[in-house]
Amino acid sequence: MTVAAAELKAKGNTLFGKGKFAAAADLYTEALVFIGADNKELRTILLLNRALCFRKLEKWEAVEDGCNTVLRIDAESVKAHYYLGLACHHGNPPRLQAARNHLERALHFAREQGDTIKVCVDCRACHDTAHTYLITQEDIWRELAQVQYTLWEQQSAQRIAAYNSLCARLERLLVEEDASSSERELLHEVFDGALRKVRVLMRCLFHAYLFPNASKTFQDQQSEPPSCFMCPLTMSIYRDPVTCESGMTYERSVLLEHLAKVC
């Protein structure tokens, strides 16, 4: 039974290398029939190979189904979490929060297991490099950054809309209050400048004390990041910062590369 599954897997690998992803996925599915429940390693390989085929075909629901099955076998599978993150990000509709959770886990387990993860169809038998490419922490981080930026854009738009609605509502309340009193109308004519200042002060008090979350709107403007968030070697935003005994902070990968050269 295992021999038949291995043969089907090898044929699937060949088809994958030729870009025939649908046919390869069918062979991986057929191979899964011959795998016993106790052979978890081969079952995981076939499921991930098939998930990668579905990723190429952009069948995101099928990617999710296969990767969820893998996670029930191995909860720390970097590939499964990474593919699930892609599926949640690019599926219809996108589920950005779930995508971020899976990509964060993929990045965490990738750092624990090593910098580079060999993916694509598993060709241990034939060692065919044409079937192999690499997923690095950089790939996972880049996808995670896109998800986080999209989440920020959505949350920013919601805060700005709420802030503008609040301003319009306060303005209407102030106008209605002025129009309801003849005495205020008189005061408005006599002390026009003073009342305008009072309006500004009231608006500031409302924003500062009654609606503290509205102030976050001003944080949603795009700007250059502070220098404390930038690695002095790469001049890019920190992704995995480490602090030396001297108190200086650097990007981990760059520091390790430098130490490997000088030590």
Image (cartoon, rainbow, N blue to C red):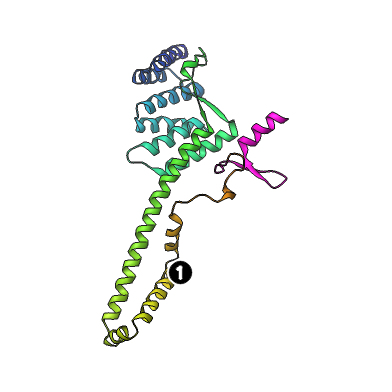
Q: Nearer the viewer, residue 6 or 37?
A: 6
Image coordinates of residue 8 in percent, x first then y, are: 41, 14
Say which residue label 1 marks: 208
- Horizontal side, residue 171 vs residue 123: left or right: left
Residue span colored magenta: 235-263
Image coordinates of residue 110 in percent, x first then y, are: 55, 33
Q: Nearer the viewer, residue 206 or 229?
A: 229
Image coordinates of residue 130 in percent, x first then y, are: 47, 16
- Horizontal side, residue 176 vs residue 144: left or right: left
Q: Secondary structure at mark 1?
A: helix
The quarter of the image holding the N terminus is top left
Residue at x 72%, y 30% (from the top left corner): 262
Image coordinates of residue 154 in percent, x first then y, are: 38, 50
Q: Nearer the viewer, residue 229 or 130?
A: 229
Mark 1 is on which residue type? Ala
Residue at x 46%, y 11% (from the top left corner): 3
- Horizontal side, residue 176 vs residue 105: left or right: left
For residue 218, what is the image quadrant? bottom left
Residue at x 29%, y 80% (from the top left corner): 178
Image vertical order of residue 48 relative to residue 108, above or below: above
